[in-house]
Image (cartoon, rainbow, N blue to C red):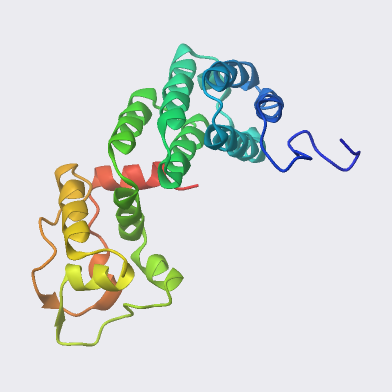
């Protein structure tokens, strides 16, 4: 390693178990538990995605180390949450879910009022989802930003009428109607939003028709996934 390289840099262009262990062990207050739990999973699974997940987590925690809740990370609940999230990450192949698990972990241990039961519930929910559920939730959490990222394909409306289905068809052109409807229905059943269907015609307010549709629980889940 050259003097200009930090401990998280791999000269072989890959994330190794050693790099992950060094990065996690350096996290203030929580490093011992993180490194120990991570090593147990790494030894069981030689998994590139898991190594990258853990390295990204170490990078995130290093950036927010001053916000880490010292009381929570010295509790049994912290160790339980670490094992739960790391085990689910080890089983996941989908980037959207890995990113969600990482966000939940970071947001929990940097919260002044870290709530293990709440975090564990949301981890279980995300583990039961497909990436499409996370995509649609993130659109609902900030519709205007989601539209802007896609080149304002929906815009502010101006037509006579529209439907949520038509709006999502523009935002998610690779999705078929069945994917849109099933995902929306799943989120409704999970109490994420409060609208039962997508095909009801309504005044065309463009992307703004998606605003304000999350339930209180849906907003909470969205906050946990924001990083």
Q: Residue at x 70, y 30 (%)?
A: 19
Q: Quadrant of residue 70?
A: top right
Residue 65 against residue 154 in the figure, above or below = above
Relative horizontal placement of residue 136, taking residue 76 as reference (left or right): left
Q: Position of residue 183 (x, y in %)?
A: 21, 52
Q: How many marks?
A: 0
Foreground pick, 81 / 215 = 81
**In the image, is residue 198 above or below residue 28?**
below
Q: Residue furthest top?
A: 76
Judging depth in this view, the residue of 33 and 74 nearest the camera is: 33
Residue plotted at (26% across, 82% down) = 157
Residue placed most toward the observer, 75 or 153 = 153
The residue depicted at 59 percent of the width and 38 percent of the height is 52
- Report x, y in % for residue 126: 33, 38
- Is residue 221 or residue 166 the one in the foreground? 166
Question: Picture coordinates of residue 107 (x, y %)?
Answer: 48, 37
Q: In the drawing, does residue 69 fall left or right of residue 201?
A: right
Instruction: Give me the residue at 14% from left, 44% from top.
Output: 189
Asked if residue 123 lies left or right of residue 48, the reply is: left
Q: Residue furthest bottom?
A: 159
Q: Quadrant of the N terminus?
A: top right
Residue 151 image position (x, y, % from top left): 43, 77
């Amino acid at each position: 390693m050259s003097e200009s390289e930090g401990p998280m840099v791999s000269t072989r262009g890959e994330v190794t178990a050693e790099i992950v262990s060094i990065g996690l062990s350096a996290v203030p207050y929580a490093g011992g538990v993180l490194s120990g739990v991570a090593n147990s999973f790494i030894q069981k699974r030689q998994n590139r995605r898991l190594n990258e997940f853990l390295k990204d987590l170490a990078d995130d925690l290093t950036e927010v180390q001053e916000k880490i809740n010292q009381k929570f990370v010295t509790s049994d609940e912290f160790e339980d949450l670490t094992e739960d999230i790391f085990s689910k990450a080890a089983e996941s192949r989908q980037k959207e879910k890995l990113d969600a698990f990482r966000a939940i972990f970071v947001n929990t241990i940097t919260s002044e009022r870290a709530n293990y039961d709440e975090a564990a519930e949301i981890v279980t929910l995300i583990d039961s989802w497909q990436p499409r559920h996370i995509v649609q939730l993130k659109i609902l959490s900030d519709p205007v930003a989601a539209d802007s990222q896609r080149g304002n394909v929906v815009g502010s409306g101006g037509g006579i009428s529209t439907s949520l289905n038509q709006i999502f068809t523009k935002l998610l052109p690779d999705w078929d109607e069945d994917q849109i409807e099933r995902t929306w229905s799943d989120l409704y059943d999970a109490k994420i939003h409060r609208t039962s269907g997508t095909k009801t015609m309504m005044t065309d307010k463009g992307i703004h028709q998606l605003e304000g549709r999350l339930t209180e629980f849906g907003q909470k889940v969205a906050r946990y996934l924001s990083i």
